[in-house]
């Protein structure tokens, strides 16, 4: 069982805004420092094949200048593996990537892509990088991640966050079941994608989830009230939901 719930702040969309005009403002490394000040436990960044937001230089500066653990989101390609091995981030989260998608749509097919993923998990792990696989809350995918030797999985919360009132409870139950399955087979469980102030509580309340990775909503909220305030509010909602859940468990 996990007590403290870590918050990884994804700063990709600071780079999206910067890239809209070129130049250097706003700087995702500055955002990472502000996130650290506000209580983030880690920084997450996704270097996409098309470099639509985070750039190679951003990755290099994040790896060199940020004290918090860096979670490098990457597609399973030789190019990204070489970059990960060069910077040696604390963690690498392998995600599926399609050039035409707007964001990471759906999880990695760890079961179907087992043979092609195996060398990536092995090489990253051998370099001391903690590997996680971004997968749907589906036991088949969790079992495949375990068999691949990944120590961590990140559950895709997009379907839960996007669900309407008729299906949201069922989507949440899939995440709860997957988190229980992760614990049963010895995988550390993270979750993320699409989380907001409104959707974070029920996920944070799942006591075996160790980390949430949140980006787009926080950067959007930062426009209205500042990044530190957005992160602090998210952190407070997470802590409150987790404390209530732990209280119910021990009552
Ligand atoms: N986790 C993973 C693996 C992701 O790919 C993303 C999006 O880059 C996130 C978490 C964060 O999602 P969002 O930006 O919707 O909060």
Image (cartoon, rainbow, N blue to C red):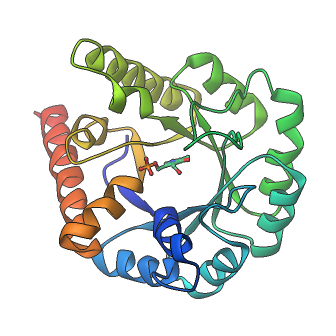
Residue at x 36% of width, y 19% of height: 171
Horizontally, is 157 left or right of 86 in the view?
left
**Residue 65, visible in the rendered structure:** yes
What's the residue at 71%, 44% (across, down)?
99
Q: Position of residue 233 (x, y in %)?
A: 18, 61
Tell me: residue 94, above or below residue 88. Answer: above
Q: Position of residue 130 (x, y in %)?
A: 67, 56
**Left of 86 or right of it: where is 129?**
left
Identify the residue at image location x=32%, y=60%: 220
Quadrant of the image occupied by residue 145 = top right
Q: Nearer the viewer, residue 72 or 244?
A: 72
Q: Is residue 250 above or below residue 173?
A: below
**The residue positioned farthest toward the left in the image shown:** 251
Nearer-the-camera pick, 66 or 176: 66
Q: How many marks?
A: 0
Image quadrant in which you'd find residue 83: bottom right
- Quadrant in the rendering for residue 1: top left
Q: Is residue 42 left or right of residue 113?
A: left
């Amino acid at each position: 069982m996990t007590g403290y719930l870590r918050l990884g702040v994804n700063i990709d969309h600071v780079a999206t805004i910067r890239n809209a005009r070129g130049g250097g403002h706003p700087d995702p490394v500055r955002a990472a420092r502000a996130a650290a000040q506000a209580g983030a436990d880690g920084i997450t960044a996704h270097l996409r094949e098309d470099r639509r937001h985070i750039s190679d230089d951003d990755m290099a500066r994040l790896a060199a200048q940020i004290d918090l653990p860096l979670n490098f989101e990457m597609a399973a390609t030789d190019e990204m593996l070489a970059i990960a091995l060069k910077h040696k981030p604390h963690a690498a989260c392998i995600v599926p990537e399609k050039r035409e998608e707007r964001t990471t749509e759906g999880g990695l097919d760890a079961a179907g892509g087992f043979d092609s993923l195996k060398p990536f998990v092995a090489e990253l792990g051998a370099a001391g990088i903690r590997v996680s696989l971004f997968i749907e809350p589906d036991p088949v995918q969790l079992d495949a991640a375990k068999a691949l030797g990944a120590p961590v999985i990140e559950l895709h919360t997009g379907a839960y966050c996007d669900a309407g009132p008729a299906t949201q409870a069922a989507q949440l139950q899939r995440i709860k079941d997957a988190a229980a399955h992760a614990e049963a087979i010895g995988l550390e469980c993270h979750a993320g994608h699409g989380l907001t102030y409104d959707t974070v509580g029920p996920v944070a309340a799942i006591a075996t989830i160790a980390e949430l990775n949140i980006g787009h909503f926080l950067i959007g909220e930062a426009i209205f009230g500042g990044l530190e305030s957005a992160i602090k509010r998210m952190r407070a909602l997470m802590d409150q939901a987790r404390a209530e859940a732990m209280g119910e468990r021990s009552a």
